[in-house]
Every structure is written in C-alpha cells, then in structure tokens.
Image (cartoon, grey):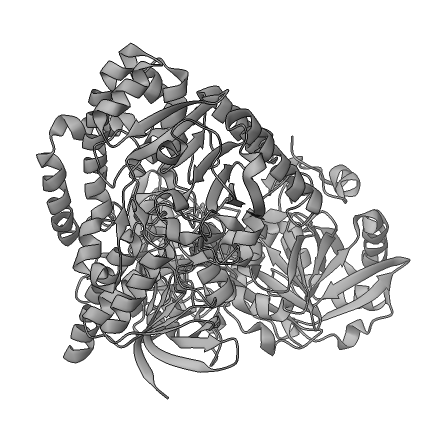
Amino acid sequence: MKQYDAVVVGGGHNALVTAARLACERWKVLVLEQRAVLGGAASTAEIFPGCAVNVAAQDAGLFPAGFAADLGLDAHGLEWIHPPALATSLTGGGEALTLWRDPARTRDDIARHSRADAARFPDWADHLHTMARVLRVALDHPAPAPHDMTARERLRLLRPLIRAGRLGKRTVVELLRVAPLPARDLLDDWFESDALKGMLASTALAGSRQGPSAMGGALRMLYHATGCDPHGFRSSAFVKGGIGALSAALAAAARAHGAEVRTGTEVERILMEDGAATGVALAGGEEIAARCVISGADPRRTFFALVGAPRLGPEFNRKVANIQMRGTTAVLHLLLDGLPPLPDAAERLAGHTLVAPTLDYLERAADDAKYGRASARPHLDMVMPTLHDPALAPAGRHLASIQVRYAPYHLRAGSWQDDSTHDALLANVLTVLDDFLPGMRDRIVDHRLITPLDLETEPCLTNGDEYHGQMGLDQMLFMRPIAGWARYATPVEGLFLCGSGCHPGGGVTGGPGRLAAGAILRERKQVARLSGRS
Amino acid sequence: MLLETPFHSRTAPLCRSRRWRNWSGYAAALSYEPGHEYEYYAVRSGAALFDISPLRKYEVTGPDAAALVDRVVTRSALDCPVGRVFYTPWCDEAGKLIDDGTVQRLSADTFRITAADPCLRWFQDCALGMDASVRDITLDLAALALQGPTSRDILVGLVTGADIAALPYFAVTEGHIGAAPVTITRTGYTGDLGYEIWLAPEHALAVWDALMETGRGYGIAPAGLDALDVARIEAGLLLKEVDYVSSWTALIESRKSSPYEAGLGWTVQPRPGRDFVGQRVLEREAASPSRWALAGLEADWPSIEKRFAAVGLPPLVAGRASREAVPIYAHKGPGAGRQIGYVTSATFSPILKKYIALATIRRDFGKPGTRIEVELTVEFARHRVPATIVKTPFFDPARKRG
C-alpha cells in the first residue's frame, strides 16, 4: 500500500494551503475532496448555465497578497481585482452612499449625508487601519497558550509582542478597549449618520448570530479589516474567474510541488491504531495509509463524523459539542438580464452592495434570528461579480450573489426542507430589494436560494456555519476551536486540524492553513527527533 | 429541607435516637437506637436492614449499552454475563477516580449502575456517538440492604419466583416479595452475607413490613449509617470523599487518586481493542507504579492503653468510625520518623477487638507486616503508637461468598 506523509481531508482553501506548504517541504501529500470542485465554501460552480457563480464566499480581501505571491499563485493564474467602489449602501428610495478606494470620493459621498462624518472619516480609516494591524499580528502567529506558560512558550510570544509593541503601546491598549465593544457603541463614538453607521456595522455581522448591539461586534469589524487596507471599511478583493480560481491556483501550486489532489473522493472515516491516526478510509472502502492525517473539515465534523466520539474522551467531546456553530446566512444567486436603474450602477455596484440602512434595521434583523426566525427584513450583502469580471456570465447577462442575513440554521418553527420556509425567505429578500433597489426584480431571469441546510449538505458545513464556528471573543485565539487545543494538534496523535475552525478563524484568509502547516512541520520534526534518539 | 425516602414513614418512628444525616439530600438515620452497637451486631450475627434509597441509580439501555458501560468503567463490562453484578470504579480522562459503585447486568443490553454522587451528565457525555441511552432512575427505585448471617434465611422464606438459596455472590435475580416485584442482588457494603433489594417506591412500605415481620425470628434490626461505617471498614471497602477524593471535587491535583493508588488496581482491566476512559494513562501507571498505595493497618492496642493509662484514663477511642485524617510515620530504619502517609478511616472493630484503619501510604511501606507508627492524641498531647500493615479485608467470613 502506498504510504503518504500526509492525507488532507477536504479540498477547501485552507486545506489546499496546508497541502501546498507541506508539498513545498517535500512531503508526499494527498488531498481528498468529496465534491467535484475544489474550494469548499470558497468555490465557484455553474449554478446557471454558462455562468461561474461563487457558491458561498465572494470576497478574498483577507487573503494576504504577499502570502499568495510566496506560494507562486500568480504563476498559476491568480489575478486580483480591486474595483474602485468598495461598498455601496442602499438607503432607500433609490438613494445610495458609496465608499470608494479614493478617499476624496468617499468624503464627497459621505458629505451628502453628514459633513461632520465626512470630516471624521479619514481619522476613522486611520484608526481602523492601525487597530487591524495590531490584530493582524495576533492572527499571523500561532495562538498563545496561556494555560501552558513554559519558558519556551514565553519566548514564542516575544516576537508578536515586539511586533505589536512597535505599532505603539497606546494602540495595543486601545485595541483591548475597543475589541469587546458592540459595533453600535464604537460607531456612535465616531459618527452621526445612520446610513454610514449601518453600513460600517454590517461588517460586524458576518460570522455571528448577534446584532450590532451585542458585545464583541467591534472585534469582528476589526477582524474583517485585517487585510489592512486603509479605506475605513472591511478588506475587500475579488478574484478573476471567481473565488474558485483562488482554490484552483492553490491546488495547482500544491500539484506543482508534487501533491496529489483527488476530487470526487469522499473520506468516510479516519483510521486509528493505538490512539494514533494511521490514514483514512474512503466511502468506497479503499484505505489510504499516511503518517499523519490533516482535516480541513470543521472540528465537530472531524471529531464526531470522521473520528467518532467514542474514540475520544468525554471531557473533550463535551467541549467539541459546545462549540457554537450557527449558520446564519443564506445566499441568493440571481441571473439578471441587465442592471437595476440606479445612477452610475455599473460603477457603484461593482463592490459590495449593502442593505444596512441603519443600526436599528440590523438589530431587528438579528432579533428575528435570536428567536429562531429568518429575518422579515433581512440585511443584504450583494456582490455583482460580472461588473468587475464580465467573463463570468454570457454577454448581456449579469450575476448577483446576495448574502442574506439572518437565515438561522436552527428555526423555531418549520425547517429549511419546507418549501414554504424557503419561499418566505425569498419573498422577504425580493420585498427588501423592491424597497432599496427598485427595478431590480424586473431584471431577474433565474434565481437559486442556498439555505444554511444546503450549505451543510454541499460543502459539508456543520449547521451551515461557513465560519466553522462563530467568531466571537470566546471562540478566538487560544479558545479556537476549543481552549487548550488551539495549536492544530488533536487528542489523536498524528491528526491535525487546518480549517476555518482553527485560529485565526473563518473567511477566505488562508491563515489556519498556513499556521497549521507550520505547526505540523514543527511537531513532526520533534517526533522524528525523539524517535531517532530512542 | 432534607427529602424523605420511600421508607421514611417506617424508619422515622423507629429512629428513637433522632439522629439523622444528610445523605445525598435525603434524611438517613445514623442509628435508630441512641448507640449503634446493637445495629452493628445485627450485621455480624443477625440481619440488619438498611435504607439505601439515596444511592444514585442509573439505567443504561440500547444496542451499545454494553459497549458504553465498558467505555465508562475500569472493569471489563463485556466480560460480565447476564445476571451478574460487578463492583467497579470509573475514572476521568487522566485516569483519576471519579466515583465507584456496582453494575448489574439485567439483560444483554440493560445495565443498572449505582453511584455515590450524580454522574448522569458524565455517563451521557461518554455515550455521545453511541446507540445507548442513560437514564437517572434514582427516584424510580427504592432500595434496601439486608445484611448479616440470617439474611438469606429471611429472604428464602419471603421471596417467591427466585431461588435465593442458590443466588451466587455478586449475582442478580428478579422475584416477588408479596405482590411487589423486586430485583435482588447478592451485594452489600458490609463484607458479610447480604443482599440488596431494588423495588418501585410504591411497594416500599409493604416490602419493609414483610421483611421486618419475617425477620423478627431472625434477629433483624433496622440499622443506620454508623453501624454501616464500622462494618465497611472491617470489610476494607472504600468510601468516596473519605478514603479517596473524587477528581471532580479535588481542589488540587495531588488529592486525586488513581485506582492503583486506592487499592483498586485489580479493577483495571485493559483488553486488546478496549478503550475505556483513562485507559491509556492507567496503562502507563501500571508500567511505572505511583508511589502511593492503599493499606490496612492494625494499631498496637497495648501501646494505646499505655498512653491513656499514663494520664490515668481508660482507652478513649471513638465509639464510631473516625473519618479524620491522621499522619503515619516510618517506624525504624532509614528515615525513621518521617511522615509516609495518613489514615483515612479508622474504627475499633468490635468483632476483631482491634483498632483498625484504612490508610494511604507510600507504596514501599505498604507490604503486610511492615511496622509503622500512627499518631494518637491523648489529653491534647500528640503521641505515636506502633502499628502493623495488614491485608484487607480485616474481617472476611466464609459466609460472604458461601
């Protein structure tokens, strides 16, 4: 039987990052993806005939361009797109507020709502940028291990601390003040315009079920800005050919270093002997041996479905069972035969188009989710990729992918399997579109609504949680995925995690995959050293 | 307010001492008479009837029931035939004791587990991913222990539908007492011939009355926890939170005990392919033993008498079993006088006429016959009296198994 150094379970973007990194170190790596397409939640599929649609994730602004260059992804066809408009907030009655990459244009746009806010915005952008840079340091390094403060551990913390310290002690302290704040409190400190505040707060909603008034929202705002561009909004970048092209480039880089990538291959369980992982068993019955197994699946799926709870300790299992995994987002894909009648639509709608008119609007949408209902008036985050990448659809057609928040996975009444639940959410979205983007409905040629249940079935996201675990203060850094196990190793020797459920977290960041590869290399070197000695 | 067991309306008028103790939230008699001696002798020469309803009871059912029990406890549950009972502790992931109790196998996929303290969540956590369910049946099951040399004769005359005379040690059977369906196990906490009777609470009073009535000619006496405590020390049986500290309640790591450290090494039964909670750690411990062990000891009675006589007193040893930790010192040789352990339970054994104790002691001092010294306080002054390590149980009559 062929023996691999590592079998990687799943072909999501993080798994591919880990595979590529290990392959660079001359590891014999095999990636096994259940679906026909790579990328997991960051994949592009032909949802409408002749169209390349980003199934779930749209934006790769958190994927460090430098890291992509290190992996040589540009040589494998990766091209970034940065449309001039970052985001446009629809404020009702055909009105819109756009944040641009050009600060002067942003200022003019905001000034139409509030001169004071327009004047403050450059400072805000600077503030957000500085904070995000400090947070970035924490995300670039393995999570600290405060429960295990050995001398070595302290030494390891030194570098990030020095790096963060260089950004200014005051900034670090300010980050500690700001991170736990509700988005509302932070924004009320800065601005007066409801439209601007609603728009900025929308970045605090992704990855959580909680609304803008809940603690920890500011942390998510910062997290989504850790791409570290100085525009005062979330980091945003699109990939030419769809987000799946990033995953394809990663796979190509891995293959170029000798990794094998097999699609349409479902791993049924992880094989173990004496408490150590020895390989995987495929759905067809085939067994593949490997020195270590690396799972890009979310922690709960990895431990309960692939390893099996009875093979793990009850104390550990309880913690895994208690990871907050709550899908909150549905995605509505639309095929359009033209643009909605908004002035400068082609330019303004090329980034994110938001329905987040006020903080209260977002709060009410979250209230519904709190009580297990889909939002009656949902928050929408729409990307029309054909505006910056026309090749994605046939000529004359446009695509729009709308993240609909909130569509909680766990509904108090009914289920996502019911047509009525499905249709009701669709109707809610279309009504909101009528109010905020009149005329849009008339352009729709075809649609496809992807519910949190669909996300659980197709890219295998437990509870439809595309972040593999909610992004909150209690589930970040050394508490991600669970306290004491934030270093990619697991209680099963030779089994590692590398997906979004790990530090630094969800989104198309490549972070967990990159740090996991580093941790695995270190750990295996240590094992080799110890076994070499004996 | 403390809860009342299903037998309370019978036990309360009998409890002339009015001495009650909180046992898992229930009022449990310490002794029915002002002193416990009579009740103790009922255990050893007649029959003592204990209300043990406050024990925690769990039912495990389902296709994976055996696998689940086998995962939880240190002894191999798969090796337990239907109709048998076994005593076992269970451990946390670090191989430290959580609790201990008996496991009855009622059918291929039905088990009953008794525990000193609530363990439902733990059992259910262990059941994650298995096709088995765990139910707390503490309230659904009243329980009595009938312990002593005449206990068999009482039950033989009383129980229908089961062959009590042929019921082996640590076996379980179903039968009736009068109209009441009962489960009878040949188990107990006294180290004597004895049985435990498990029944639905609505039959509690009828069964109590039938036992007391039939038992009258056999020297039956209702007995409380004081008598039980003396008997269980004689039998060398451990008491949770006294002889060992549960890993759930220990405030510091060093207070926790592994089964090996608590004299329960014989209950650790790894098997190829088995993976019970704590197994891997315990296998390592078996290979390189801990420095702590459980030991029984016998204090030198003449030395105790002498210490008391010196101040003009007769030996004043506690009438009841003592749960006070008392230091133990090395007797002779290198390191003489150094503390090497501590007594966890001690009692004067009325039947052996000896002062006996269970102790946690350094393993190298735990061999039977080793001479050691135990602290003894006489008139507010601390002394050391010689003692000898002996094998447990201290008292082990043939009738227990016979």
- Residue B345 drawn above or below residue A374: below
Residue at 74% across, 74% down: B167
Image quadrant where residue A20 sits: bottom left
Say which of A3 and A81 sits in front.
Answer: A81
- Residue A351 drawn above or below residue A157: above
- Which residue reaches farthest right? B179
Q: Is residue A44 left or right of residue A233?
A: right
Tally the marks.
0
Q: Is residue A479 left or right of residue B242?
A: left
Would you say residue A206 is visible in this rendering?
A: yes
Q: Position of residue A306 (x, y in %)?
A: 48, 66
Say which of A101 and B105 sits in front.
Answer: A101
Image quadrant where residue A344 sits: top left
Would you say residue B375 is visible in this rendering?
A: no
Q: Is residue B29 left or right of residue A394?
A: right
Q: Position of residue B361 (x, y in %)?
A: 33, 61
Say which of A163 and A207 sits in front.
Answer: A207
Q: Quarter of the image containing the N terminus of chain A?
A: bottom left
Q: Quarter of the image containing the C terminus of chain A?
A: bottom left
- Residue B67 drawn above or below residue B273: above
Q: Position of residue B89 (x, y in %)?
A: 51, 62
Residue at 44% across, 36% down: A381
Q: Position of residue B253 (x, y in %)?
A: 33, 51
- Residue A102 drawn above or below residue B100: above
Residue at 61% across, 48% down: B225
- Which residue reaches farthest bottom? A1
